[in-house]
Image: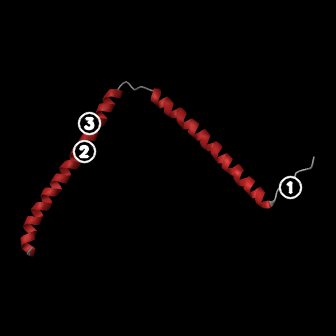
Amino acid sequence: MTTPAPFAPDQLALLERLIRIETKLDDSRNYDADHETRIRQLESERHPDHESRLNDHETRLRRVERSVWIAAGVAAGAGGLVGSIVGPLIGT
């Protein structure tokens, strides 16, 4: 059996890069596992006021959506009013 030839410098650089990639992947897997554990823990917790929080969230979203539509309507009305006043003044 022959002894293996020593690595060439470019092979050593490649090996070093592969080691770094593997280390980063291991760290990422550990982070993902920790994150998944935390998510499972949070999902298993049930707050006593969960339903009221959910309903409050929906109410707040509806209020925000309504205010956006009201603002759009006011802007359209104001734009029409300004256009009808300013238009004749500038001669269009």
User: x, y percentage for residue 10?
Assistant: 76, 60
Element at label 1:
loop
Q: CA distance from mark 2 to mark 3?
A: 10 Å
Q: CA distance from mark 1 to mark 2?
A: 68 Å
Q: CA distance from mark 1 to mark 3?
A: 70 Å
Callout 1 amino acid: Pro
Callout 2 amino acid: Glu
The residue identified by callout 3 is: 59
The residue mark sitting in front, 1 or 3, is 1
**Label 2: few (<14), some or many (≥20) within 10 Å?**
few
**Label 3: few (<14), some or many (≥20) within 10 Å?**
few
Element at label 3:
helix
The residue identified by callout 2 is: 65
Callout 3 amino acid: Thr
User: x, y percentage for residue 26?
Assistant: 65, 42
Left or right side of 46 for 1: right
Considering only vertical position in the picture, is 77 above or below 26? below
Picture quarter with the C terminus? bottom left
